[in-house]
Image (cartoon, rainbow, N blue to C red):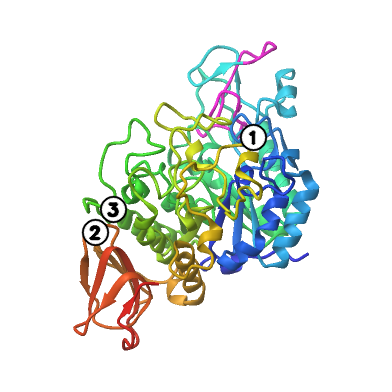
């Protein structure tokens, strides 16, 4: 079995994220599984993706959707166990698709055997304990260890990777080179090597900035990740590490191949991505200020904040001498889909084309390619609720395959989350053979991304306008123009054919016309021979 070496083509790959319990069910028990993912690999190959990132599939009590890991080296039975993972890797690798797993590096479940041992052994060193109550600590469930530090929910005790700054009043602050932190670094490498040996092509690292505590500028955290990457590359070159950091300008120089722009992170707390798409619906944090995003039908937003953050990231990555890149997702399991609130599937082609043509790694969240929506009003499932206005379940509903199938089975058989009850909800079956569908458009955008070197993540990007339309040149001669508003817009493109577009045309004077929610990719190298397109 030959594992696809994603690092060798990092600037060209397209990532597809699968929430495994919601994607496809092969055994009919109502829960998505890895054999279900394997059965849909032909669809993913047809779509044109290079790598599939799976949310955590390890043994877990699933109080946080699998991000509370109880065994890092075994696949949970709900997904088919280790044998199903081997089958998936074999089928994916045969198609040249890399499988990227999710590494919860900073904590475990409180049901992990490591934590049980640590509760009875003061010299264990794997976790951070305090004999007295301290800020950010919670009481141990049993025994006399006092209090422990969690990393997110209380049932997720933080692994001890040390503190960057000592404090004599807080003796639990071990240095990063103490025995416990060293053991955890070694364990981290061993876990990843275990899966690389079995054919995994990379890892996405959950909460990657959270390991070393009280670390100004993440100096020690960066040292840790550089060490981990170096040790992994020695035996497994060509694999990739993606981070959930939300600040590519810091995370990529800190040792990652890719870091995503996210709804949090960085000095601006996720403003670059929120300023593009956050419309006050779905997963909204109470503290987020209300503002119109760029993907706004009324045309009240601007992409300037995103453009500035992207430029900062490129400059910081180049200055650090890194070969890594930023990543740009359509959505993910933690925040709203593009189709959310008043924004409909008819309005999102400009946003999807942005993801596929920007100077970053595109990450397509499952179902976004057909316009699946954030489903409001769902009950919390496996820790999906993060507050009264931040419910993530609406972004985790079953993949809509169609043909009376959902999850690969009837919708009524789903026991994880309900299907979108809207009778007009999109499906793969309804769109796959429709030349005017959103799915066909996204597939064409992915194909263009993969075939045209001007769309490489490392290729030049020159921004010409940041609002309506948002216009930029890639590689000097490929013009992308995006109008996410309901008002028609124009741009003096200067000629050249539209090679991919929607509700777009050029006139004899070289003016590009974008109707409501229109978008276009124009090749400036050649003369136009077809001045109208609605692909």
Q: Residue at x 51, y 16 (%)?
A: 134
Q: Which residue is mark 3?
A: 294
Magenta range is 140-164
Of residues 152 and 164, the one drawn nearer to the viewer in this rendering: 152
In the displayed structure, 91 sits above or below 147; it is below
Q: Alpha-carbon distance for marks 1 and 3?
A: 43 Å
Kindly give the residue lying farthest to the right in the view shown: 83
In the image, residue 490 above or below residue 144: below
**Residue shown at 43% from the left, 42% from the top:** 217
Q: Tell me residue 62's x, y (percent).
A: 64, 32
Image location of residue 413, percent across then percent down = 65, 40
Tell me, yes or no, whether the two marked residues, 3 and 2, touch with CB atoms within 8 Å.
yes
Residue 253 visible in the displayed image: no
Residue holding disc 1? 181
Q: In this orientation, does residue 475 appear? A: yes
Q: How many marks?
A: 3
SS for callout 3: loop
Residue at 65 percent of width and 50 percent of height: 408
């Amino acid at each position: 079995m030959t594992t696809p070496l994603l690092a060798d083509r990092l600037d060209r790959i397209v990532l597809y994220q699968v929430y495994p319990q919601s994607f496809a069910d092969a055994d009919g028990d109502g829960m998505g599984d890895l054999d279900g993912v394997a059965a849909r690999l032909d669809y993913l190959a047809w779509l044109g993706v290079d790598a599939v990132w799976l949310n955590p599939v390890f043994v877990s009590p699933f109080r946080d959707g699998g991000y509370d890991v109880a065994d890092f080296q075994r696949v949970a039975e709900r997904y088919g166990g280790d044998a199903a993972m081997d089958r998936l890797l074999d089928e994916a690798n045969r198609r040249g698709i890399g499988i990227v797993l999710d590494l919860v590096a900073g904590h475990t479940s409180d049901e992990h055997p490591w934590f049980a041992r640590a509760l009875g052994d003061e010299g264990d060193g794997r976790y951070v304990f305090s004999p007295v109550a301290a800020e950010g600590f919670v009481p141990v469930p049993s025994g006399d260890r006092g209090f422990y530090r969690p990393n997110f929910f209380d049932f997720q005790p933080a692994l001890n990777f040390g503190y960057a700054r000592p404090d004599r009043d807080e003796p639990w602050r071990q240095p990063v080179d103490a025995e416990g932190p060293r053991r955890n670094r070694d364990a981290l490498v061993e876990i990843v090597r275990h899966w690389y040996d079995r054919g995994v092509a990379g890892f996405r690292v959950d909460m990657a900035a959270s390991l070393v505590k009280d670390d100004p500028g993440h100096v020690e955290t960066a040292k840790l990740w550089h060490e981990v990457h170096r040790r992994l590359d020695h035996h497994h070159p060509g694999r990739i590490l993606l981070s959930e950091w939300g600040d590519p300008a810091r995370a990529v120089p800190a040792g990652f191949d890719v870091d995503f722009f996210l709804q949090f992170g960085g000095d601006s707390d996720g403003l670059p991505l929120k300023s593009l798409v956050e419309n006050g619906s779905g997963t909204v944090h109470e503290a987020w200020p209300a503002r119109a995003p760029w993907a706004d039908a009324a045309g009240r937003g601007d992409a300037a904040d995103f453009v500035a953050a992207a430029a900062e990231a490129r400059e910081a990555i180049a200055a650090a001498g890194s070969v890594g890149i930023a990543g740009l997702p359509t959505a993910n399991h933690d925040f709203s889909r593009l189709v959310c609130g008043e924004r409909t599937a008819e309005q999102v082609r400009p946003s999807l084309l942005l993801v596929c043509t920007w100077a970053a790694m595109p990450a397509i969240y499952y179902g976004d390619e057909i316009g699946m929506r954030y489903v409001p009003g769902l009950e919390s499932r496996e820790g999906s609720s993060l507050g009264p206005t931040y419910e993530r379940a609406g972004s985790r509903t079953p993949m809509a395959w169609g043909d009376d199938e959902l999850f690969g089975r009837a919708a009524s058989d789903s026991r994880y989350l309900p299907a979108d009850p809207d009778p007009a909800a999109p499906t793969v079956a309804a769109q796959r053979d429709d030349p005017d569908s959103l799915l066909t458009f996204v597939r064409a955008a992915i194909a263009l991304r993969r075939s045209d070197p001007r769309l490489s993540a490392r290729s030049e990007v020159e921004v010409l306008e940041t609002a309506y339309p948002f216009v930029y040149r890639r590689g000097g001669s490929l013009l992308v123009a995006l109008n996410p508003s309901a008002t028609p817009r124009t741009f003096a493109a200067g000629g050249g054919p539209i090679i991919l577009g929607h509700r777009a045309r050029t006139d004899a004077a070289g003016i590009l016309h974008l109707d409501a929610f229109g978008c276009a990719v124009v090749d400036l190298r050649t003369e136009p021979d077809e001045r109208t397109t609605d692909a």
